[in-house]
Amino acid sequence: MMGYTIEAMHAIQETDPDVYTAIQAEEQRQREKLVLIASENYASPAVMAAQGCVMTNKYAEGYPGRRYYGGCQHVDSVEELAIDRAKQLFDCDHVNVQPHSGSTANMAAYLSVLKPGDTILGMDLAQGGHLTHGSRVNFSGIIFQSHFYGVDRETEMIDYDAVQQKAEECRPRMLVVGASAYSRTLDFPRFQHIAQSVGAYLLVDIAHISGLVATGLHPSPVPYADFVTTTTHKTLRGPRAGMIMCKAEHAKAVNKIIFPGLQGGPLMHVIAAKAVAFKEALSPAFTVYQQRVLDNAHTLANEFNQRDYRVVSGGTDTHLFLLNLTNKNVTGKEAETALDAAGITVNKNAVPYDEKPPAVASGIRLGTPILSTRGMGADEMTQIVSWIDQVLEHPHDTQIQEHVRKAVKALCTRFPIFYSAQSTSA
Ligand SMILES: *Cc1c(COP(=O)(O)O)cnc(C)c1O
């Protein structure tokens, strides 16, 4: 069974059959569908077991050795392990492993040095950025004066000269770098130069690419940024949570804003799972995995290019890319629905300079973390592109969807999730 023991699942079944049924159905969905959602991954049984462990029962406000509760010896051990391993993985001066999520980590980075009303400059959500980088509907746009940079209309890549110009116009206190839907290598030395030229702090949010950064497959922002935030559940393949790294000079402010500033008791079971995930990420096998993630993304993008699909910016340097479906006469929303009916899960996504509203969108976002976790390689990528193509050429043809769904299920059986019934008969 999954990260939890069979006995634990039986306990849920006895106490709450409704929730048990939903969990079982979700496990089946994860097992039988091809999930290409770029921000998701399947954590290991060890990570999930840690996340479901007794440390959920412990209050531990404060930091190792300086807690507001007794009985913290053992949770101190796991938090220290998580900290040591994170430092090894990312080579940072200081890390706080308590943020409950990527969003909270960003909030902490801002509030450790900024005041409400200060100006921030981040990447536009509509062009690949994230809600927490200044969007009006998010705390970051509510608390701060937010301005945005984006990508060049032609190349669909970040125009660094334009970023420099924007920074000179709006004079931000914080330059925010990082994205949820941008497939190209980020030039951190250049961003540092821009930040320094206007006296701004530099925050780099590697939520999506942290697995690639940890293994050296994407350059690291750590030498260049004041703050580096990340989620731990995307390419890094840990529990659903966040983390914040910073230069030594900001260490005190970061710790203080996480607790008591923004959070109460840390989720010690999740921190235990972070420690386990970081140990996995330090192993040579994890670098092999991340390389596979990259190789698979290249193969997928190349196959689409060869079939007359428009890959945004022409390709990818990471685990993800966007397809602009305008030339296929199908919207992102229609594509998402048709593909899901065929057992292929993706998300609709705005493309740069999209003329459709975000709820419809002209594109879809595709990522390879989960396919790669399942052990799939180039042959499977080619097959998957062929299926996606068949579905999108006839988005309302339910027979094609049915046919593809069966083929998808058969492929998934050949690449079982490690917690599936097939792989753990013992
Ligand atoms: C996913 C993501 C986040 C937010 O993470 P949550 O854990 O969902 O709050 C922040 N920044 C970027 C760039 C992301 O992609």
Image: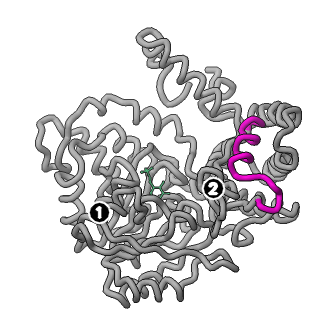
Give residue 363's position: percent from left, percent from top. 69, 57
Seen from the viewer's position, the closer of residues 173 and 243 is 173
Return the residue at label 2.
Answer: 349
Q: Is residue 231 left or right of residue 374?
A: left
Please check the rendered image and state whether residue 338 is part of the magenta-colored stretch, yes or no.
yes
Of mark 2 and mark 1, the one earlier in the sequence is 1
Seen from the viewer's position, the closer of residues 162 and 236 is 162
Residues rendered magenta in the picture: 326-343
Q: Residue at x 17, y 48 (%)?
A: 62
Q: Residue at x 15, y 49 (%)?
A: 65
Which quadrant holds residue 251? bottom left
Which quadrant holds residue 314? bottom right
Is residue 74 shown above or below 249? above
Q: Is residue 322 left or right of residue 56?
A: right
**Residues at badges 2 and 1 in contact (C-beta under 8 Å)?**
no
Q: Residue at x 34, y 57 (%)?
A: 139
